[in-house]
Amino acid sequence: MFVAVPKVASHSIRFALRPCLNDNDEEQVSLFVRKRIERPEFSRVEHGHQLAREIRDALGSDVWSRYVSFAVVRNPWARFVSYVAFMMRHTDLFASDPQAAMRRVLANPQNQSPVHFRAQADFVTDESGVVMVSHLLRAESLQSDFDALCKALSLPQLALETRNASEHRDYREYYDADLKQRVAERYRIDIDLFGYRFDDESNTGTSG
């Protein structure tokens, strides 16, 4: 089971795995192709970014426990830049003044998508805050992590392609000390749970 964390290579993974799906496999997605999982818990939302615990509850704990589950996580500072560039893609605000755009998103709940702005930890943990997916891949080493997962699942080696990537430079170029601290405060749970530091390099090629 793939738990798709927003702005963390979701569509790169989907495109790579889609040829391996059989008729009984299910997918929920609304970008590039539209697919729906015919269960009430999924059909009432448009997006394909369900929490791991939501998937477990929809399928039942017995079914969940029988499957290998995985997700991809990403440096929170890199992910935030990608998020802002994505949200501002129809304006020139990020391109003309990226720090102003980043501050606007942090200060204004109207610019904080309840799905895409959410902490990554929410997508992969249970109600007690314990990671509940079998494997956590990292965007910073995505292809090699994905290769290892494919090998463990007896799948062929699948090359990941860039899909739905936001346009931006290296995330570190956008930060001053204040923004670095404010993003750290917002995503402290991700930093602590996944052990990220600001300078952990992000593989922006497939991560969005």
Image: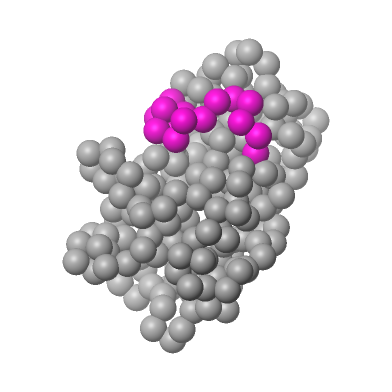
80 lies above or below 11: above
Give the camera-side residue of 130 and 188: 130
Q: Position of residue 159 (x, y in %)?
A: 67, 65
Q: Is residue 31 visible?
A: yes
Side of 21 relative to 51 (left or right): right
- Residue at 44% x, 35% y: name it: 194
Q: Position of residue 12 (x, y in %)?
A: 62, 60
- Residue at 27% x, 46% y: name it: 126
Q: Position of residue 59 (x, y in %)?
A: 25, 67
Give the residue furthest to the right. 96
How many labels sit on residues?
A: 0
Q: Is residue 199 magenta?
A: yes
95 lies above or below 146: above
Which residues, given as a range, are shown in magenta?
187-202
- Residue at 54% x, 45% y: name it: 138
Give the residue furthest to the bottom. 23
- Residue at 74% x, 34% y: name it: 170
Q: Is residue 18 visible?
A: no
Give the camera-side residue of 9 and 203: 203
160 lies above or below 108: below
Q: Quadrant of the N terminus?
A: bottom left
Residue 189 image-quadrant placement: top left
Q: Position of residue 78 (x, y in %)?
A: 62, 35
Q: Is residue 189 magenta?
A: yes
Give the residue furthest to the top. 177
Q: Tell me which colouring the rendered structure shows.
A: one colour
